[in-house]
Image (cartoon, helix red, strand yellow):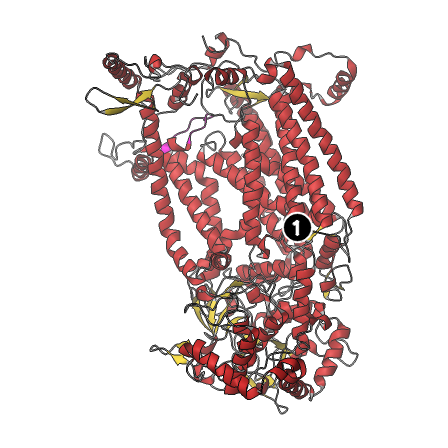
Amino acid sequence: MSHMSTTSSNGTRAAQIEQSGIVGGIANWADDRLGIGSLAKKNLRKVFPDHWSFMLGEIALWSFVVLLLTGVFLSLWFQPSMVETVYNGSYDRLRGIDMSAAYASTLHISFDVRAGLLMRQMHHWAAMIFIAAMLIHLARVFLTGAFRKPRELNWMIGGVLLLLGILEGFAGYSLPDDLLSGTGLRIADGLIKATPVVGSYMSFFLFGGEFPGNEIVSRLYIVHVLLIPGLLLALIGAHMLLLVYHKHTQWPGPGRTEKNVVGFPMLPVYAAKAGGFFFMVFGTIALMGGLLTINPIWLYGPYDPSKVTAGSQPDWYMGIAEGLLRIMPSNFETHIWGKTISWNVFLPGQVLPIVLWAIVIFYPFLEAWITGDKREHHLLQRPRNAPTRTGFMAAMMTVYGLLWAEGGNDIIAKVFHLNLNNITYFMRGAIFIGPVIAFIIAKRWCIALQRQDNEMLLHGYESGVILRDAQGGYTERHLPLSLDHAYTLTARERDTIYTSEPGTDLHGVANPRSRKERLRARLSRAWFGASVQKPTAEELEEAHHHADHVRELESDLAHPVAGKEFDDHNLRNTDDIPLRGH
Amino acid sequence: MRLLPRKLSGSLSARRRSRFAAPVVLLLGLLVSGGAYAAFAPAQADQQSSDASLVAQGRQLFLVGCASCHGQHGEGVVTERGNNYGPPLVGVGAAAVDFQVGTGRMPMEEPGTQALEKAPVYNPKEIEALGAYVASLGPGPAVPTKADYNYKQGDVVKGGQFFLTNCTACHNFAGSGGALPHGRFAPSLRGVSPKHIYEALITGPQQMPVFADTTLSPQAKRDIIAYLKKSEAAPSYGGFSLGALGPVSEGLYAWIAGIGFLVLIAIWIASGTASVKNKKKAQTHE
Amino acid sequence: MSDTHDLVVPEAQEPIPDPGLPEHEERLTDAYPAQARRAERQVATLFGLSMLFAVLFCVSYFVFDIGRHPTKFLGLGASNVFLGLCLGLALLCIGFGAIHWARKLMTDHEIVEYRHPASSSEEDRVESLAAFQQGVEESGIGRRPLIRNTLIGALGMLGLPAIVALRDLGPLPGDKLWHTVWRRGMRVVNDVDGTLIKPSDMVVGQLVNAEPELFFETDANGQPKVEGTELLQEKAKAAVILVRMDPADITPGPGKANWGINGILCYSKICTHVGCPISLWEQQTHHLLCPCHQSTFDLADNGKVVFGPAARPLPQLPIMTDSEGYIVAQSDFKQPVGPSFWERG
């Protein structure tokens, strides 16, 4: 038998640790007071499955730690104050200029504190990577169906973390009070003023008077260093606790089921891998901080509401909001009863971002309602095995990507010598057409891949060996998959389309819920209808019979071809089969 | 926040109170430009027989290289739709010629939305002759002298403020350039010679507005050039500049360099390592 | 096979039964002590290199100057580049070492942990619900609606102090958004240096980024009349651009025929979209482009929006010349400048 006969389960060797010695002594001392023994017993050898895509969230976690470390360093010098001061530091191109203490202290950190510029740039790069990592982690969780029961709440926590991270980033890059951050705040002020009824009041309250006022930096500072980081820490804690409680999802495969989790223990393998990854993230950010300039605030100068620079963009994660603003058509404003509603600002600046975010965080419930699936899931789905979901993600990513690109349309026009206006005209159409095309392509692509999987299960994979028969015709020899591979391909559930109960009951009384139910059934059919189901045991059996028949015919050939010795179409592991190229 | 320290703006307001400042500057400018040729190129002047022959030489060059678009006498050519095929050159002055031809923008390789910079087609003497001819069509800004754009006397701090007020909206905070409507663009200012920057300011080439000496003083122009040249000479404090295009290119690097590299690391961490079985197999099949 | 088979739940119609966990494959480092020793040396070397880079970080900290005369390295700031390189490499070496150690030398037997449903047992549920019911019963909240309702009211009412206490975050808008400092007779001067401007100073195609003269005036004590926060607040509304076009190109709107001087027009510099200052003027097309969101205004046609998200034309400031021939405002703007707001109408 080629499969292992025993597996060391969790914690079987724990009892052998010596109770004496220094480690034992400390452990006993702590356990007497904290009772951490039982906690440690459960978690020290906790199992984490090994897959690269499971480490994307870790990038976010570790860059958050880097943000905390570098942020504390910066706060030792940064002055969150808009008090006016005359700059007299080392940077000669601004010496003698009046500016806020916030900007002057940022210049001080950049030019008169050794490693200060490094820490500033690391902090900024870490923020960019923090949010990017959250986003790709989100994409992974989405595409593999890891948000399904029981993990919906953790998905929502993740959604809140993403939003908080973006707000935290915005608050952070607004602090230096340079021209770019001031321009960003000016735009934020415009967005707030566009709020119906209370807009101008909100603006005056936020800025402590008329824009720009002298309060906003100190207010954003406390939001940036206390309020949001506190929430982030708490929610990251909850996110991790739920991860530990639910145990990590895993890919299906031999021996990997809904009832277990297979992988490496926390101590030592994951401690070393995750700990090592922390240093990798930290080191990468340090290299970027050292080699790549980010936000050279000294070039922007202090904020002045009459100055502006080409390329006034927010950081990348605000790019879609920027794109939404830019894509709006002209003259989209309502004047009614002596009041103004600025749809051109209110919609893209406030309504649509919240709508997009709400779609994301409530998605698990939407999908569960459509599919009617209320079971727990711990095995991941390959994106191809959920074609509609994958198509939906492709559509959402297309919307995101188009808006993101539109947010940088001037830079794209400049770098690629394109027509700025045409980019915007194109985007106005593409934002509606693009997602539909992306949905159809992605969904069809998934279905094609499902068919290919079935094809491989039934007829083996294409070996690249070409046979010529007696009539001179050519065929390609197919070789069977390994047993493990074949099992992995079939280790997925069959989709069940939700069917509604009849609209009227036996007595002809209309079912009050029937309209909703029928909609649900229709959606469910659209959701699963086109998906390809895995072959049944009979289909597989029949295909193998057919293969045996072909083999018999071929056995008449005078010259056996290479690889013929494996033509019995019995499932075996890939490793037992010498492939071409050796 | 005031743009200039009190002391500085104080002295400025004292100076601008003088009603004669503008006329004096204007007069000086005229004098300087009028006398520039004699004062700064005496050797060349000796070799040229006279101004008149320079104009004549320029006219010959003009007829060959420029007249097809700008008209036989620089009056411009108008298309059927009423647009300028080549704009009239009466009154644009020698400075415009020196900028357009000296940076290779003119003659244009092909009609397009914007004349592009390239290696100059004419040599300095020919450019001078062309300038003399165009200047003879009507009064316009003369080619600035070395003293005009001697930025060594410029004030980089003030120059930075003028730059951020007047230039960055199109040319960006680091002079990297930026996009304009309909495929046009503001070019990068890095590596542009002080003379050409000065000429662009006083002539307003293509879509660029004019920043005449009357409102942006010659000293302010020297300050701007001084700021730009100082910025070019200063080290890039924080490492490579990533094109100095602002947050868009920074975002690109965060994704490609940052996330890209870290995902590769994640793939490496989770990948299998060389096993005995694979190695044996590889050996037996080699 | 005993252990693993218990984990598998074979479904009747599954086409292929679960073959169970694959056999553990021995790594080269498990089989050959020399390979293991080599990996050990590699890990130790990486950790050693990390120490070296940590020391080099400290050396760089003291060797390379920052401040007024920064050390240059290939055109870059040497201090930042070397500090970043050394710190980054010191950290990366630890990371590489630790992961290499885990992959090559730590035991790589996969182990299995069993899952349990996220929910608690039915028994626990019943018990906890019962405990909750008991608590509610004993409190009597269900039987005494008066207490319940007043408590809800009291807690709800606490929201009011929380909101009211924030009232002093800022003053009310009043009419601040409706007015700027522009007055009849106030001179339009060049930004930054305050140069006065006469119509004759401007040629066709010229752009002046301008401000009201008030920002450059000082009181009897030599103090600026407007400074600090107030200056910024006023500047955020009063900044203007002055442009000169060929009068033949201009089509003044109704009542605006005498708002300019021979083709010289003055417009608000503050975008009507979300308030960025705009000075990106194309002198040939007369279009003004906002670098923030590309709203484009035609200055030859009353600041009309020709492209981009802005909804309202750019407000124009009527100008004239004063007795000394300088360009001055005829009045304040006739409408609020900058982004729209609800009360604007």
Q: Position of residue A100 (x, y in %)?
A: 71, 61
From the image, give the main secondary structure of the stretch colored magenta.
loop
Tally the marks: 1
Q: In which quarter of the image is residue C15?
A: top left
Q: Which residue is drawn at 71% across and 68% down?
A: B156
User: Residue B178: where, in percent of width, then height?
Assistant: 53, 62
Badge 1 density bin: few <14, some 14–19, many ≥20, Cα 10 Å:
many
Q: Where is residue A425 in the image (x, y as percent from the top left)?
A: 39, 60
Q: Nearer the viewer, residue B274 or C326?
A: B274
> Looking at the picture, which amino acid does disc 1 mark?
Gly
- Reading the image, the residue beneath label 1 is B239
Secondary structure under tag 1 reads: loop
- A470 vs B16, left or right, is left
Q: Find out whether residue A377 is within the magenta segment.
A: yes
Extreme-bottom residue of the structure: C323
Q: Where is residue A434 in the image (x, y as percent from the top left)?
A: 37, 49
Residue A269 within the magenta-colored segment of the rendering: no
| Left or right of residue C297: residue B152 | right
Task: Please state which of residues A1 and A385 is positioned toward the viewer in this rendering.
Answer: A1
Res A463 → quadrant: top left
Comparing C195 with C232, the one in front is: C195
Residue A502 in view: yes
Chain of residue at mark 1: B
Q: Start and end of the magenta stretch? A: A371-382
Q: Farthest residue in the left direction?
A: A471
The answer to whether residue A495 of the structure is visible from this angle is: no
Quick check: C41 above or below A235? Answer: above
